[in-house]
Amino acid sequence: MSKLEAFILGIIQGLTEFLPISSTGHLYLGRHLFGLDEAGLFLDTMLHVGTLLAVLVVYKNELMIIIRKPFGKLSMILVIGTIPAVIVGFLFSNLFESISKSGITIGWEFLVTGMILWMSDHIRKGAKKMENITYGDALFIGTFQAVAIFPAISRSGLTIAAGLFRKLDRETAAYFSFLLSIPAIAGGIVLQFGEMVSGRTEAISFGSLFIATLSSALFGYMAVVWMINFLKRKSLKIFAVYVWLLGISIILLQMTGIF
């Protein structure tokens, strides 16, 4: 993997982790394009470290609240919102890993993401703020996050949509979605490190890994800030149309044997 490829993959991971268009799906496409299908686990781990650093910087004040009040409401809604993904990941991790590696359903998953984004954009505008989020809201949004274990189902897209379904205002839906990504990304990194310790890793130069991680962190930070501001006044439909076009293109390429 060249340093330019590492930089581009970092951009892909950083942007698509927080834009509602699926980071895993785009990373799969990016690696396939560069012929890096086997450069998976260690690279993915460091790319996710980058996006975790980005979101930790954005939410540093919230993290301080959690540290000071580990059993406060903010901590509890994050725990409750994370439980469904933990259960699904524990029960079905091997199945989803095989699906992710094959890429056979990736086009259809992009279509599903677009459908949910489109539907959520037609929900009548809600007014709930962070302080109004209930434990039921957190569990509902967390259940949508669990569905995003499929590679091209967007985690941010589904959790933002779920927030809108629960009448959160648009800015708060994005804000909570990204806050909920912290335990999700951190948990994924822990699992990946565990697999690497067991010997499932690949040789990539330190320079390329550093560039990929830094690129992911920088563009991830920009994506979080931009997306929260974007949803204050703009529609999710543009992302729905994008993933629909991408999904249809992938399905057609798979049918013709090109992809």
Image (cartoon, grey):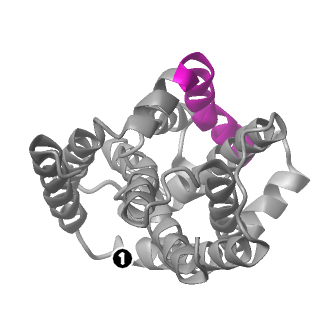
Is residue 20 toward the left or the right of residue 3 in the image? left
- Residue sitting at 78 percent across and 72 percent down? 206
Taking depth in this image into account, of 78 and 114 the one nearest to the observer is 114
Q: Quadrant of residue 35?
A: bottom left
Q: Which residues are magenta?
A: 73-94
- Residue sitting at 61 percent across and 55 percent down? 44
Q: Secondary structure at mark 1?
A: helix
Q: Amino acid at mark 1?
A: Phe
> In the rendering, at what x and y percent does residue 139 appear?
52, 31
The residue tagged 1 is: 230
Q: Quadrant of residue 221?
A: bottom right
Q: Is residue 239 above or below residue 86?
A: below
- Residue sitting at 30 percent across and 43 percent down? 106
Magenta segment includes 27: no
Residue 179 visible, this angle: yes
Is residue 207 toward the left or the right of residue 68 in the image? left
> In the rendering, at what x and y percent does residue 226 appear?
45, 79
The furthest residue to the right:
68
Q: Main secondary structure of the magenta part?
A: helix
Q: Is residue 90 above or below residue 124?
A: above
Quadrant the N terminus occupies: bottom right
> In the rendering, at what x and y percent does residue 31 appear?
45, 60
> In the rendering, at what x and y percent does residue 184 appear?
63, 45
* Few, some or many residues within 10 Å of mark 1 (<14, 14–19, 20+): some
Is residue 15 toward the left or the right of residue 118 in the image? right
Taking depth in this image into account, of 187 and 191 the one nearest to the observer is 191
Q: Is residue 136 above or below residue 159?
A: above
